[in-house]
Image (spheres, rainbow, N blue to C red):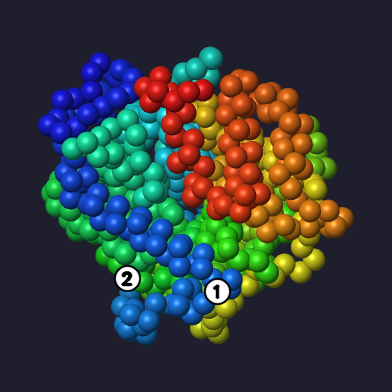
Amino acid sequence: MSFPQVKGVTYHGPKLTPAQAVILTEPAIKFVAALHRTFNPTRLALLHARQAFQKRLDTLSSPSPLTFTFPPETAHIRNDPTWICAPPAKGLEDRRVEITGGVGERKMVVNALNCGAKTFMADFEDANSPTFANLVNGQVNLRDAVRRQIDFESGGKKYKLVENPAVLIVRPRGWHLEETRIRIDNKLLSGSIFDFALYFYHNAKYLLAHESGPYFYLPKMEHYLEARLWSDIFYFSQSYIGIPVGSIRATVLIETLPAAFMMEEILWELRVHSSGLNCGRWDYIFSFIKRRRAEGGNAILPDRKDVTMEVGFMDAYVRLLIKTCHKRKVAAMGGMSAQIPIKNDSAANELAMSKVRADKLREVRAGHDGTWIAHPLIRVIAQDVFDAHMLGPNQYHVLRNEVVVREEELLNGDVIGGRITEEGVKGNVFAALAYCAAWVTGNGCIPINGLMEDAATAEIARVQLWQWVYHGALLDTGEPVTKALVEKHIAEYIPSVLKIGGVKQYHVDIAARYLSGEVEKGERKEYPSEFLTSDLMKYLDAEFTGAKL
């Protein structure tokens, strides 16, 4: 079937299936176009402001009060104790366990909704490779799930929603990502707007009529003005389809270093629509490295396994997030444990699960109101911990008034006992190489060595390799981390990556060239790319984009 004809909208992608055509209707595309024409200039200006801020950072050899600071122009917001955010919306009162996952595979959506978690963060972003099929089929799956029409049978097995499935919370792509197959008035469409608009347009009224609502997770923001943009879109969208203001609720992932200095401002901008903040720990580490890319010293982090939640900058941002959220009466959500069940090795599995248990215990004792999991089989572990230590639906009463976090604490990258090892180099090489190869096949989330890797963890691997080469970091043996060392391990791991389902030689070639090129930038004293997903986007649906494989 054909893409609908809407004035000013051009489409370069595959023909639509009948199910996809139900999503990509003329009225829905007109709504997408209205959002684009109204808000895309602001989005582009905010992305330009990110670049300008990074250029200022790059002129410094160490953090400056002129860069990383709690904004002086918004002190009145932080110092006003009277304002609070909206009360929890229907279905969001108790969020003790949230499962996350991609949206493109129908079976995975049903399993996540049925696993017993309170909510399902349906992900169009880091756990999703944004092929056009994944994006639009994901919208089909969510529309059917909302209407309880998602039941199906495959391979003799029936997939059927339980009576009380998890509440849906949808994560659109970040502001930096574009939907490359659609142009409006000859301008690329924002991936954020595309994902948000289609889900909202097709489901908001139905959800509200069935004791729920259009709920979202908002990723990758770096400034409170980016939250204001989302707020403006929410007001516009609710008016467009005629539903009450405040029907939309959004939880913001605090997963960039600049955003950690603006938590209260972000809540303030979204206060009518806010449902809290989340500690997006993996992207936060990625941002810490990327935004402080010009610095040496404690901006250079050791092996990823050593950068735990007890490290200074991680612990500080967790404490500040919990205090901020509970001061404003919204959820302070914990982060993702990357461990997943390990088959056929009971000892390794028990070790992995003990790490999950310890992580969730740390979160609930700190005052978090819920946590994330990446696999249905971990739900019981997480829920048992929160059930034992959080007797009510949340911990808003845990105010953490004793917490005072200074700017320098959010920049403290000291890792006691942390080392850069060749095993750490090898782990980063394999994670980045494998993930990039899988991503260009259309797979946005893969298990590697007992961990669930998505774009965020692959980004840590990529920028750590760059950082170590750029700054001439030394291994614990005294040897430098060089491009030659990284490329040696790339070559070693190519046969292993080829064993990943769906990965072909040309996918590995793309990934190897890309990773080698990023490390070479370090050797040439150039800065790394902002996002691997932006760089590799041209290889998705290559027959329509013209990219050479």
Which dot marks residue 517? Answer: none
Q: Earlier in the sequence, mark 1 or mark 2?
A: 1
Residue 367 to residue 230: above or below = below
366 lies left or right of 271: right
Q: Position of residue 40 (x, y in %)?
A: 25, 49
Nearest to the observer: residue 509 or residue 205: 509
Work out how far the residue at label 1 is from the one at label 2, CA to CA, in angstroms.
Answer: 26 Å
Q: Position of residue 522 (x, y in %)?
A: 63, 50
Q: Is residue 483 visible?
A: yes
- In the image, what residue occupies the spot 39% across and 44% down? 177
Label at residue 63: 1
> Does 397 sit left or right of 482 as displayed?
left
Query: Relative to 11, does residue 283 appear above or below in the rendering?
Result: below
Q: Secondary structure at mark 2?
A: helix
Asked whether disc 1 touches disc 2, contact meaning CB atoms under 8 Å apart, the reply is: no
Q: Three-letter amino acid code at disc 2?
A: Trp
Residue 114, above or below 48: above
Which residue: 75% across, 51% down?
481
Position of residue 7 measured from the top left corner of the image (x, y, whole percent): 12, 31
Element type at mark 1: loop
Q: Nearer the viewer, residue 358 or 114?
A: 358
Tell me if 455 is positioned left or right of 216 in this view. Answer: right
The residue singled out by tag 2 in the image is 268
Q: Label 2 neighbourhood size at 10 Å, few (<14), some (14-19), many (20+)?
A: many
- Residue at 18% across / 53% down in the picture? 236
